[in-house]
Image: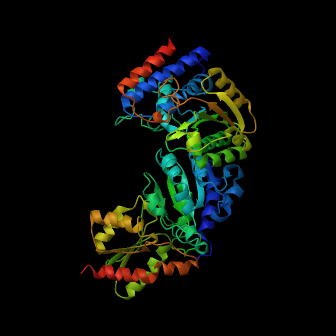
Amino acid sequence: MSETPLRDVFGKALAELGSLNPNVVALDADLAGATRSMYFGEAHPDRFFNVGIAEANMVSIAAGLSTCGKIPYACTFSFLITLRALDQIRSQVCYPHLNVKFVGTNAGISGFGDGATHQEVADLAIMRAMPGMTVVVPSDEVTMRQAVLQSADHVGPFYLRVPRVPAPVLHNPESPFVFGKGIRLREGADVTIVAMGMMVCRAMDAAEQLAGAGIQADVIEIHTLKPIDAELLAASISKTGAVVTAEEHSRYGGLFSAVAEVAGEVKPVPMGHVAIEDRFGESGQYDEIMASCGLTVEHIVAEAEAAAARKR
Amino acid sequence: MTAAIPDVKELEAIAQELRVTIVDMIHKAGSGHAGGSLSMCEILSVLYYAELKVDPKNPRDPRRDRFILSKGHAAPALYAILARKGFFPEEYLWTLRKIGSKLQGHPDMNKVPGIDISSGSLGMGTSFGIGTALGARLNNLPYRTYVVTGCGELDEGQNWEAFMCAAKYKLDNLAVIVDYNRVQLDGTNDEIMPLAALEQKLSAFNWRVIECDGHSVPDLMRALKEARETKGKPTVIVANTVKGKGVSFMEHRHEWHGKEIDDASREKAMKELKGATT
């Protein structure tokens, strides 16, 4: 288990990116200490703009900067960037397809103690529906750093989901990380488990338990929710004939939906999901809320067993 | 970019010519926003023929002045002046709002040369202008950013976020022109959302505030010159205008914010507009 919260990994990688690329600029809406964009601000004060608690203004300014050859990163909590500034994202960034990066921290329920107002369980559904938006959800410090460093070379609207909390390290720094390409973390022929973000480590634990019960799971990490790696998913689902998704997000519009869209078209198979049902989060410790929302290893195991059983 | 600046009479004639084009465009399109297009014709003729450093042959020149039409529904006016300047062929004008046209109901920067940002959803232009003004500073370029907003769109809170922000960054390379025609879609500003003491409000936000007659070419030129000479803070030019200016039955009428111009209305309007030019 790494002790570094992923928001710190993000903030430090952004500051590093700023040193590598002089066109990178960052904006924050009075949450620089919380999003960790402060690291960028400390390293590159002339390229950092704290615009106050005004997310709409922040996104529009970022759009303007992008037309001057800058690569702006607009940082705030995920609920604020995706909800408070959504018209600006849609009209001034996605419609003209400008090169603006949106960073939503405290994503999912990782703003745990703050409760439902500061958690966001629908950000991915929202951003996925924006035409031309790329949606990236790293799972550990390796993929977070890679995603940040590579994002400056990606052209167009881009959403990066950043948890507040630490995550176990799943990848080694040399393993390839390519936007749009899923990663097969474990081979199996009985059921596919597609996992994203903080649920990837839980999916790996679930696969281990399933193996003990004689069920071999094919575990696929999707870090780029859009555009999704339909090819890898189709191959895995065709092989296993059953699929379960695991995400720290609403069951509506996130990974479950995205995988169902692929499976429904190329290979309809029994499906299960581990996601947040039609509800808000609550205050508590991170793992407590994950459990109360049903986002546990045990839930993945149960869904996988059920989906595999339905094949017969 | 180095063409001689037309004299006042010519700039007035260009504005009137724009009005004729706008009425024809909306008539042909079958829908569109006449009122707010007609109110900003002098603003556009002065900007494009006496103020902005832009080059139709190099519309994305990084050194160009930026123009942001925050009130995107006045697209017919912007299209008319861009065509007149030679950014695109005049034939485009007669495709406004038609399927497959480059001239969308609201401006699309990727379809039309000379448009610096797509617009339509209101209240966002000044914030975008802060971005291009900061971009000038970061890139060490001397260009200026000009934004035209409506008065009705000042109802949107984002404007006031932007007013605070531009003052914080002391953006003296940014000028916002308010097309203050005092009428919005559902009625007058006073009926829908009073803007009273607009100049004092903007002044309290630490902007240089310049009032002018938005239909007087010399007054607009004076205001823009004062804006250019202002140091250490952004400038807002409150341009007093008349919605539907130049067409008597449209003037001050919120009903003409956005509606089709039928054959009879077109004919009546043309008589007035062309009569005024001769």
Q: Is residue A277 visible?
A: yes
Image height of A248 relative to A59, above or below = below
Task: For the C terminus of chain A, give its image quadrant.
Answer: bottom left
Image height of A305 relative to A34, above or below = below
The residue sitting at the front extreme is: B191
Q: Is residue A206 left or right of residue A73?
A: left
Residue A90 pos. (x, y %): 48, 50
> In percent of the image, x 29 and y 72: which residue is there?
A239
- Display coloring: rainbow
Depth check: give the residue in front, A117 or A104. Answer: A117
Residue B74 pos. (x, y %): 50, 34
The residue sitting at the bottom extreme is: A213
Residue B272 pos. (x, y %): 47, 18
Q: Is residue A89 left or right of residue B268?
A: right
Q: Is residue B92 visible?
A: no
Depth check: give the residue in front, B219 or B196. Answer: B196
Name the image quarter holding residue A226: bottom left
Depth check: give the residue in front, A246 or B158. Answer: B158
The residue sitting at the left extreme is: A312
> In percent of the image, x 60 and y 48: which residue is there?
B158
Image height of B187 relative to A117, above or below = above
Task: For the N terminus of chain A, give its image quadrant.
Answer: bottom right
The residue sitting at the right extreme is: B232
Name the image quarter holding residue B61: top right
Residue B237 pos. (x, y %): 66, 33
Depth check: give the residue in front, A239 or B90. Answer: B90
